[in-house]
């Protein structure tokens, strides 16, 4: 609930945004920076870009990256191949530098305007679909109306409170196995179509996959199958 200082804000559109930021319950607050920017754009009729040259530059100014030239070169070299649809599994002991290698790779992708989607799997949060919920949350505002309408009534089941789905009715719940199958198809088709819509290469990075829930691994498996049969032009790694 807004405190007194917040109540002093007269503009209801700003008040709405501040109240969400300060909501007592963390789950009611904005979960992603892109949601805040989207609300500012909508409420205040602005047109801020979800990613700017400044945010990209902030990665460049981060702490120095040492060595790992060969590993990084290998990842970069695949981006240059036309119609590459690949999955890389990077494994190694804790602390050896897997995540850091991908932060460096992310920087490289972002400077070239290659879509880099990422999610972290967490030990204590083995919530079904967790990494894919994070990825979808990040990209929904950038997705075309067409694919939101096409997949919204299924995706709403895992993102029931997403603003873009407020006008969409979730499909009726099926028997668990069928339900899972349909959702897996919807998530993977959505990602593939989203990637095509970007008309550029898309990288999906799932960090700490060993913590992922079983269903997310099934989604990944289906995605791997789909990207192996993807049409030329847009590519996924
Ligand atoms: N090549 C590197 N250059 C600089 N710092 C690194 C490098 N690789 C790892 N680090 C640092 O070492 C620590 C552990 O690396 P991290 O990537 O988190 O390991 P992992 O993901 O394999 O468990 C982090 O603080 C990270 O920033
Ligand atoms: Mg790590």
Image: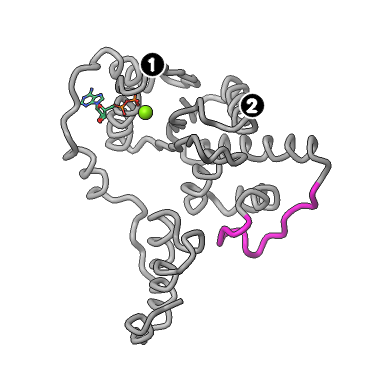
Q: Position of residue 38 (x, y in %)?
A: 42, 61
Among the 4 quarters of the image, the one containing residue 176: top right
Which of pointers 1 and 2 indicates the residue nearer the eye?
1
Q: Is residue 26 above or below residue 142?
A: below
Q: Position of residue 230 (x, y in %)?
A: 58, 25
Residue 222: give its label: 2
Point 46% across, 63% down: residue: 29
143 in magenta = no
Q: CA distance from mark 1 to mark 2?
A: 25 Å
Point 33% across, 38% down: residue: 113
Q: Position of residue 144 (x, y in %)?
A: 54, 50
168 in magenta = yes
Q: Secondary structure at mark 1?
A: loop
Q: Is residue 42 above or below residue 137?
A: below
Question: What span is in magenta?
Answer: 160-173
Q: Secondary structure at mark 2?
A: helix
Among the 4 quarters of the image, the one containing residue 229: top right
Count up the numbered dots.
2
Task: Look at the numbered disc 1 and say if its residue's Cβ is closer than 8 Å to ligand 1.
Answer: yes
Residue 92: give its label: 1
Of 19 and 47, the residue lying toward us: 19
Point 42% across, 73% down: residue: 19
Seen as rendered, the residue at the extreme top is 70
Q: Is residue 212 left or right of residue 172?
A: left
Of 10 and 211, the residue lying toward us: 211
Quadrant of ligand 1: it is top left
Q: Position of residue 66 (x, y in %)?
A: 18, 22
């Amino acid at each position: 609930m807004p405190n007194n200082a917040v109540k002093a804000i007269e503009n209801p559109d700003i008040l709405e945004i501040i109240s969400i930021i300060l909501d007592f319950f963390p789950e009611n607050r904005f979960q992603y920076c892109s949601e805040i920017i989207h609300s500012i754009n909508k409420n205040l009729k602005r047109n801020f870009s979800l990613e700017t040259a400044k945010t990209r530059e902030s990665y460049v100014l981060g702490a120095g990256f040492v060595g790992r030239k060969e590993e990084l070169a290998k990842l970069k070299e695949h981006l240059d191949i036309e119609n590459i649809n690949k999955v890389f599994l990077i494994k190694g002991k804790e602390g050896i530098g897997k995540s850091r290698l991908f932060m460096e790779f992310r920087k490289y992708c972002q400077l070239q305007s290659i879509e880099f989607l990422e999610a972290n799997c967490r030990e204590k949060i083995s919530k079904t679909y967790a990494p894919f919920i994070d990825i979808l949350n990040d990209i929904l505002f950038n997705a075309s109306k067409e694919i939101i309408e096409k997949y919204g009534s299924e995706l709403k089941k895992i993102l029931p409170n997403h603003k873009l789905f407020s006008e969409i009715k979730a499909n009726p719940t099926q028997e668990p196995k069928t339900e899972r199958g349909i959702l897996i198809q919807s998530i993977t088709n959505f990602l593939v179509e989203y990637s095509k819509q970007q008309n550029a290469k898309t990288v999906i990075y799932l960090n700490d996959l060993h913590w992922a829930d079983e269903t997310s691994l099934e989604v990944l498996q289906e995605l791997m199958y789909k990207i192996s049969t993807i049409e030329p032009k847009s590519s996924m790694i």
